[in-house]
Amino acid sequence: MKKKRIESLSKYFYNELANNTMPFWVEHAPDMKYGGFTTCLDRQGALLSTDKPMWVMGRITWLLSRLYNELEKKEQWLELAKHGVDFIRKYGFDKDGRMFYAVTQDGRPLRKRRYLFTETFSVIALAEYARASGDGECLALAKRTMDLILELYNKPGALEQKIIPETRKTRNHSMTMIQINTLQVLRAADQSADYDNLIDRAIEEIFRYFVKPDKKALLEIVGENGEYLGELPEGRCVNPGHVIETAWFIMEEGRKRSDTSLIQKTLPLLDWSLELGWDRKYGGILYFLDIEGKQPVQLEWDMKLWWPHNETIYATLLAHLLTGEKKYLDWFEKVLDWSIKHFPDKKYGEWLGYLHRDGSLALDLKGNFWKGPFHLPRQQLFCHLLLKDQLARSD
Amino acid sequence: MKKKRIESLSKYFYNELANNTMPFWVEHAPDMKYGGFTTCLDRQGALLSTDKPMWVMGRITWLLSRLYNELEKKEQWLELAKHGVDFIRKYGFDKDGRMFYAVTQDGRPLRKRRYLFTETFSVIALAEYARASGDGECLALAKRTMDLILELYNKPGALEQKIIPETRKTRNHSMTMIQINTLQVLRAADQSADYDNLIDRAIEEIFRYFVKPDKKALLEIVGENGEYLGELPEGRCVNPGHVIETAWFIMEEGRKRSDTSLIQKTLPLLDWSLELGWDRKYGGILYFLDIEGKQPVQLEWDMKLWWPHNETIYATLLAHLLTGEKKYLDWFEKVLDWSIKHFPDKKYGEWLGYLHRDGSLALDLKGNFWKGPFHLPRQQLFCHLLLKDQLARSD
């Protein structure tokens, strides 16, 4: 990438993040009456639901803390991060240490799920805030919650399963991949434990169970020992954006440890996903595919969602800067160009999240139980920091 | 409706049912090795999943029995219905009398859900087959299962809830509406109990809790006492096809009892749904809407699914023939015309199920966990029988 382009992109991502994405959420999300954030918002920022999704609560809290830690020591960001942490600590936890997936506006528990994602997103919130504030109790809570996640993940039968396990035992890519990133965030806040080992183990499981080089795929769901469940749609399912996210989690680990062989081992995940996921007809990245080319069963399979595009923008930029390979630069420019043409809300700021296959708008909203201030601002922040770092090295 | 049109439509629906829809399923669905039916099929009838959705198992078994009972005494239909009943009896039930939502190809249980829909679709299968075959054990099992459904429906806390009930208690239109139809089918097979009373009660609950004349809507989810949950997307959600299905269940009850006031009371449900659900931009019926005009949160909100169109075709034909009102004939012709232009698979028969908003194909498949031989053949059968009856009256 040419220096001029690096400079202009670094500014572009900073400007979008600081003057477009963040102002939308800072203006509309904080709930000054009941605490925390309301993030189910329409295009203009008005409430679509008073319920509070706790995935998003953790993610926005992490983001504000990370911005404070790595972009700028802005008091408002730290204060709002504390506002999120306070809500999580007060209303997020059940008696058993597990967490609620959703609560009412005033914090009463609505739903607890089988999966541990509320827990992982709360760990990154608590850990990143602890790093920003020095709050030791917060760090201790993050560590206890991470311990519980690992205990439940590693103990067969500890969590209720969707499928009756006597009939079929499966492994889900999501729960393994999310550990990598969660542990990376926790490691940055806490030098007291051997997180490298735990991260190695999660990465090893990704390659052992889910990566199928003969199929050129990382599969979402496999049998207990990594068996290919080719007779089932879920066994054939590829989620390219999700694989691309996993790929950059692992590439970041390679970058941190200067482990080029880990990076090289991971690049095919990115290559396969770009090849399979890019829509040759309309552009953009498809949501779900079937590795045998059969019809995916998800109704939304051919929609274009914001987040796979954010993950791809960062992953391809990282891959290019780590390897110097031009093909990643080409992908980066192509996906960035398509994204900027289709997702930004020119009238009210931030990005719209859900497009039809042909790029037309499908859902006229900014936030729901999954979309909130996370993939887009994370991508903008990480791209900006990566480019800034690249400039510093070249000076 | 003119007599010529009645004659030609009656033939059209018969022909589509007998020579297009049924041959597709009779050829591809029976599993002669493991029993029952495999119904997750691609466009050509090849397996997309070996797993067996038990909703569909009940529905296809009901359909085959009903065809035998009301269309033609074709031995193949009765034999295949028995083939379905045998699988349901052997593999469908858990020890507590409740049923599995999905089983493997060879009948091992995969998943049991909070909801009672597998149970209701099995009741109609068992009852309709009992009526066709005179199998008393089958009828007894249908009755026991219906008793259990009503017991669990009426006892607060008997079923696990999605939302923690101490925080929020809700009522779901689905579970009330499905009782009407299930009891109607059971009543036709069993004269021994007072089903009219139970049906009255379900209808009364529909009007008491879910119908909101001031909003011109029947809502999918309300508070425990019918409260409008307007601060939540699920509280504002209207599913026009679902309401139209409920409307014809109730109109059928009015027709059977010659209760014109019940029919008149129900017609607004149909009117509101047509008005709100019809897509003025592309035609067809939208899947989900928000009664306050906000953005629905379902990713598939603007897709055109086969089944709301089937329900509307039958409901508008029934409304027209019961009332003589021209507006229902106009809707019938308009929805039939749009449906015939967009859904039929001209190459491999039957209908495709899932279109984008603009009518283009979204999912290239014939069956999944929800689509199977039910809404389309039921509509074709019921339209044919209704038109035949109309001709008989006018002769």
Image (cartoon, coloured by chain):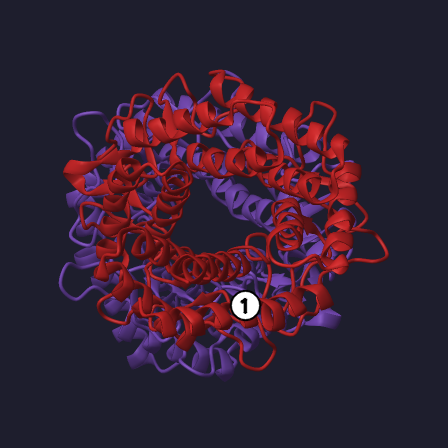
Chain colours: A purple, B red
Front-most of residues A204 and A300: A300
Residue B191 in sight here: yes
**Residue lying farthest front?**
B395
In percent of the image, x 45 and y 59: which residue is there?
A: B392
Position above or below: B71 against A154:
below
- In this image, B256 relative to A74: left or right? right
Residue A212 in sight here: no
* Rendering coords of residue B311 (x, y %): 41, 55
Q: Residue under circle 1?
A: B14
* Rendering coords of residue A156 (x, y %): 73, 32
- In this image, B145 relative to A56: left or right? right
Position above or below: B338 against B127:
below
* Rendering coords of residue A189 (x, y %): 45, 37
Q: Quadrant of the C terminus of chain B?
A: bottom left
Displayed quadrant of residue B112: top right
* Rendering coords of residue A335 (x, y %): 39, 75
Front-most of residues B220 and B32: B32
In percent of the image, x 35 and y 72: which residue is there?
A: B338
How dense is the environment of label 1, judged by Cα within 10 Å: few (below 14), some, or many (20 and up)? Answer: many
Asked which secondary structure carries label 1, the reply is helix
In percent of the image, x 44 and y 74: which residue is there?
A: B8
Front-most of residues B205 and B79: B79
Give the chain of mark 1. Answer: B
Q: Give the amino acid at mark 1.
A: Tyr
